Image: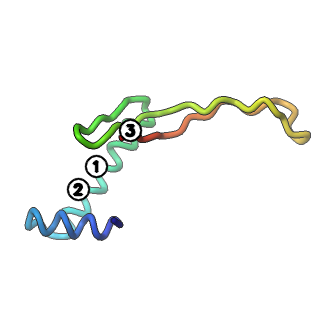
């Protein structure tokens, strides 16, 4: 399902205008992104959790950069 299909499905179920549903979806996604990047875990019951995970640094250094890369953080979803 694409974003357009999701918006159309929500519009059909709620009878809200397309623009309102689009704005609400953008606000929800932006709020989840902000919370996850701040280190909070966002849990939606019967759906899943969004959280910030950490990727370990690799042991191999390239000749251009002799220092090993640092650990990296990335958003993750668990159903």
- Reading the image, the residue beneath label 1 is 28
Check if mark 3's residue and mark 1's residue have beta carbons within 8 Å. no
Judge left or right: residue 40 versus residue 20.
right
Which class describes the residues within 10 Å of circle 3: few (<14), some (14-19), or many (20+)?
some
Judge left or right: residue 14 versus residue 56.
left
Residue 17 at what x, y percent from top left?
A: 14, 69
Residue 9 sits above or below residue 71 on the image? below
Label 3: state its secondary structure.
Answer: strand
Judge left or right: residue 73 versus residue 67.
left
Which class describes the residues within 10 Å of circle 1: few (<14), some (14-19), or many (20+)?
few
Q: How far is the residue under mark 3 from the one under mark 1? A: 13 Å
Check if mark 2's residue and mark 1's residue have beta carbons within 8 Å. yes
Q: Residue at coordinates 31% horizontally, 70% vertically from top-left?
A: 4
Judge left or right: residue 71 versus residue 6.
right
Quarter containing the C terminus = top left
- Reading the image, the residue beneath label 3 is 50
Q: How is the image coloured?
A: rainbow
Q: Residue at coordinates 34% horizontally, 42% vertically from top-left?
A: 32
- Reading the image, the residue beneath label 2 is 24
Q: How far is the residue under mark 2 from the one under mark 1? A: 6 Å
Foreground tag (3 vs 1): 3
Label 1: state its secondary structure.
Answer: helix
Residue 33 at what x, y percent from top left?
A: 39, 43
Foreground tag (3 vs 2): 3
Residue 14 sits above or below residue 75 on the image? below
Q: Which one is nearer the viewer's eye here, 73 or 38?
A: 73
Q: Which one is nearer the viewer's eye here, 36 or 2?
A: 2
The quadrant where residue 34 appears: top left
Q: How many marks?
A: 3
Which residue in the rendered view is the most extreme toward the left? 15
Residue 64 at what x, y percent from top left?
A: 89, 42
Residue 15 at what x, y percent from top left?
A: 8, 67
């Amino acid at each position: 399902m694409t974003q357009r299909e999701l918006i159309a499905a929500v519009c059909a179920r709620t009878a809200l205008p397309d623009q309102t549903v689009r704005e609400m979806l953008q606000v929800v996604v932006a709020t989840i992104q902000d919370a996850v990047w701040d280190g909070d875990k966002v849990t939606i019951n019967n759906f899943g959790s969004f959280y910030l995970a950490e990727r370990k640094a690799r042991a191999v250094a390239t000749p251009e950069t002799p220092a090993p890369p640092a650990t990296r953080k990335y958003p993750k979803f668990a159903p």
